[in-house]
Image (cartoon, coloured by chain):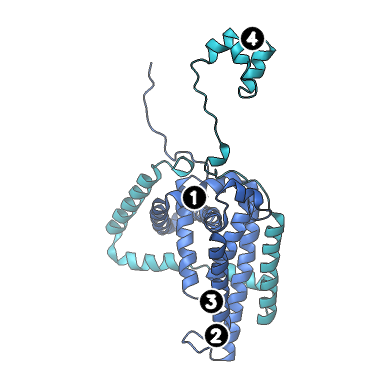
Amino acid sequence: MRRTILIALVIAATVVTALVAAPLFKTPAAPTTFSEAASMITRTAVSVSLLFVWIIVAIVVTLMSGREVRYSSIEVRTSPLHCFALGLVAVTSFVLTAILFSYLIPYLVGIPLLVALAILAVITKIYGTIAVFHAVGSIVAAARSRDKLAERRWLRGDLAMVVIGILLLGAIRLIPVVGTVVWGIASVFGIGTALATKFGRREPWFLVWRTADV
Amino acid sequence: MNDACQRYAEDPEKNAAHLRECETCRSLYAGVETRPVNVGTLPLAAWEGARYRSWPLVLGGALAVLAIALALCAAAGISPIAALAVGFRSDSARAWIALIDQKLRPLGPLVFATLFIIVNTILVLLLRRAPRGIDA
């Protein structure tokens, strides 16, 4: 059943991508001139090139901290609503804080603060999106029983789940409008799960104040 | 405790006969409820098989994407480096922040400060919740 869904998803993504790249009939989004067609190919080339960079970064991060990525992936699957809400609030907080820091640029302290915020935001987004890749890969292709796991030769392990997730979301990303929306939602989920699990370390962000019991 | 007791402690099912012979072990393990656990019936844990590195799939996927990217770059008449440069440069985050700044500026600093405090308070409240994850 799951394998059928996986195959159907891959075929659907391929068909949609093929239709977008070379539509059978004219749609308002279809290129009508040679320059529009060239621009569409260039955009697709840029997207696929970035996808390759994502694969490399995801492989490196998963090899370096596979357990953390797995914990964050589990969190996004068990508490999706919390991760999404946290991601939305965190993105809003990043934007408002960036505006606040931009007011401080004339006082010199603004630039290092902005740089620090940008680094935090980029690391959060990259790590979180990789966790979402793992979650998507696990939802679609992970084994549900030990027998199935033992039967599999290639389709198991964190690295395989991450790569499957990237390939699926990457194929969806090539669809105009829908791809951008889906990728944006995945980023919000990712930022949420990265912050909810403290980058997979599952430590509290804030310490609770307690008086020492004598 | 002798060797037989040690062997029983290590594998009670295989050395079940020892319990009939040894009074010490019988009194020691009498209160312990033992139930055989069929590992196969337990749900699959997330970490099982997770460390396996499926290099053929990973390399195959990466090389396939690289081949498609190179083909598309060749069709578009740009180098892969130029494509990456365009991709990294077209970051919409800065544009979004500028747009929101433009929308918020007419509202005044008081509204901005209130919004900032409300959003960050909600963020702190959401961050206080412990992750469920593997405990769920």
Is the C-beta separation of discs 1 and 4 under 8 Å?
no
Residue B41 versus residue A124 in the image, above or below: above
Task: Please give the label number shown on residue A16.
Answer: 3
Q: Distance between the residues labelled 1 and 3?
A: 31 Å
Residue type marked 4: Met
Give the colour of chain B. cyan
- Residue extending farthest top: B23
Q: In this view, does A113 lie to the left or right of B128?
A: right
Disc 4 target residue: B1
Give the colour of chain A. blue
**Quadrant the C terminus of chain A occupies:** top left
Task: Please give the label number shown on residue A23.
Answer: 2
Chain ID of residue with mark 3? A
Q: Residues within 10 Å of mark 2 (few under 14, many from 20)?
A: some
Mark 1 or mark 4, whichever is nearer to me: 4
Residue B31 versus residue B115 in the image, above or below: above
Q: Label 1: state its secondary structure.
A: helix
Is the C-beta separation of discs 4 and 2 under 8 Å?
no
